[in-house]
Image (cartoon, rainbow, N blue to C red):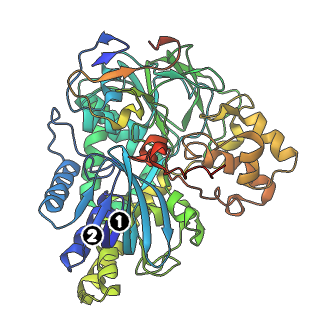
Amino acid sequence: MRVDGRDVVATPGISVAAALLAAGIVVLRRSPAGDTPRGAFCLMGVCQECTVLIEGRAERACMIAVRDGIAVSLRGPHAE
Amino acid sequence: MKVDLAVLGAGPAGANAALAAAGHGLSVAVIDENAAAGGQVWRAPAPSVTRDDADARDGAALREKLRISTVEHLDSATAWLIARDDAWRVDVARHGRSETVTADALVIATGAHERVMPFPGWTLPGVIGLAAATILLKANGVLPGQRTVVAGCGPLLSLVAASILKAGGTVAAVVDLASRAEWLGALPALAARPDLLARGALWRARIAAARVPVFHRHTVIRAEGTERLGAVRLGRVDAEGRLVPGAPEVAIAADALAIGHGLVPDTAATRLLRLRHRYDAASGWVAARDGTLAGSVARLWLAGEVGGIGGAAVAALQGRLAGLAAAQALGRSAAAAEAAQLQAGIARAGRAAAAMSWMMRPRPAMAGGITPETIVCRCEDVPRAAIEAAIAAGARDLNQVKQWTRCGMGPCQGRMCGEAAASLLAPHVGGRENVAPWTGRPPLRPVSADDLLGDFDYADIPIPAPAPP
């Protein structure tokens, strides 16, 4: 995966959320109202906490499978 | 797309409803958000994950049956609007555009999601649901963390702890709201499901063999850390989930906490359709259905958790029953004998399901114990104190709480905070059964405006020629 322009090794076919966790990337965004750090929470598409930009679209990272070279951009101060 | 039957959800209930109806000659479309059928319990593992447990086999068998059937499976599809004119109409965002499915009959099998009662620090990265942990482990082959605390209530505690150990991970502690005696009391109801008893015994043996500390009648007081979870603090509780004053606290270093307090039926679709709902002590607010699973309007059936938590086995039987009922209603000859058999099976499996649902229930004093500064609504960062202020100012139903505080107004659409907010309101209106769920509104899930527009372009709108001067 390309995460904020950086190469991250990931297993194809697992969810982007799982791959980010496996790579030690747990802070995915900050909450818009309270500006507190957030990571994947429900992993089943319900809570929306893992919403990041994937290939330029706002997507739940738990609902998108890793494929070779997939571009992920984390929101907040870590975003590109 | 025009079909005889549209099914919302491709889990054990929805997929079986689709298969049963298609088997009796109906044209069927099943709509599901995930890339593969199976729902949560029978979720398809990633290609890199090898599994050979009962749930994996059941899920694989279901997906194979769907593959060779005539059922049209709209995967990776978000149903965002349901309406009824002469027929049912379901609008589905998929592959970057929105399409309309019309159908003579509808089965809603939207399942359930997890309930996590709020506590300080539950928004920290590293804190996840118990069901979330099963998805990481069983579908992705990824551990929740280096050292995981597993907490909450119900059978998922042992499943998650044992799965982490089996995968080579470390469980720092198991923290169970229930006492040992409560678990022993639940055993007789499981007599009809020796398979579940055997699995439970195996999980417990694995946890004991790894010498994982198990804290019964304990809860997580708070999750600690700044940017991510660093430690979990535990305290002793009574049978109602109330912290025992003066009892010593226990701090456990951990980078992951998997925690859950049962399941909540996803009634967004049934609420949007203004169906009749009822309050059930074990499952909370559920969509009302009769013995044939028919909902409160014509040509609509409700299969699985949306009408009451029963687990995957019950959901699968209910799905078949709903599919048969739909086929019969549309003039196909469905075998009455099979329906009777399914109903008997549902009743048999129901006892074990009710016992597990009881073990998963949130304890009655938990909501009262939420501290004022604890975030209840994760999406909008609304603390308990703001909700209490709204109640003190006169808010008497969930919609008012939402309008006055923004609790439930964010992208999860109240799915994560609704249970806690309702429990906070309950003592002011005479009980939880007097707190109706939020009014259902479209879209059923957040959906991108680009998907709704699809190929539409404002530039394509013909502009009339200006009037002559």
Query: Left of B376 or right of it: where is B189?
Result: left
User: Does the residue at mark 1 contact the one at mark 2 (Cβ under 8 Å)?
Assistant: yes
Task: Point out residue A10 in the picture as x, y percentages from the top left corner.
Answer: 24, 21
Q: What's the mark number on residue B28?
A: 2
Quadrant occupied by the N terminus of chain B: bottom left
Residue visible at 68% across and 58% down?
B432
For the image, the number of numbered tags is: 2
Tag 1, which secondary structure?
A: strand
Callouts 1 and 2 in the same chain: yes
Query: Left of B66 or right of it: where is B280?
Result: right
Q: Chain of mark 2?
A: B
Q: Amino acid at mark 2?
A: Val
Mark earlier in primary sequence (1, 2)? 1
Whether residue B426 is visible, yes or no, is: yes
Residue situated in front as seen by the camera: B95 or B124: B95
Task: Point out residue B399 in the picture as x, y percentages from the top left corner.
Answer: 72, 53
3D distance between C-alphas at marks 1 and 2: 7 Å
Residue visible at 20% across and 79% down?
B25
Q: Which residue is mark 1?
A: B7
Q: Chain of mark 1?
A: B
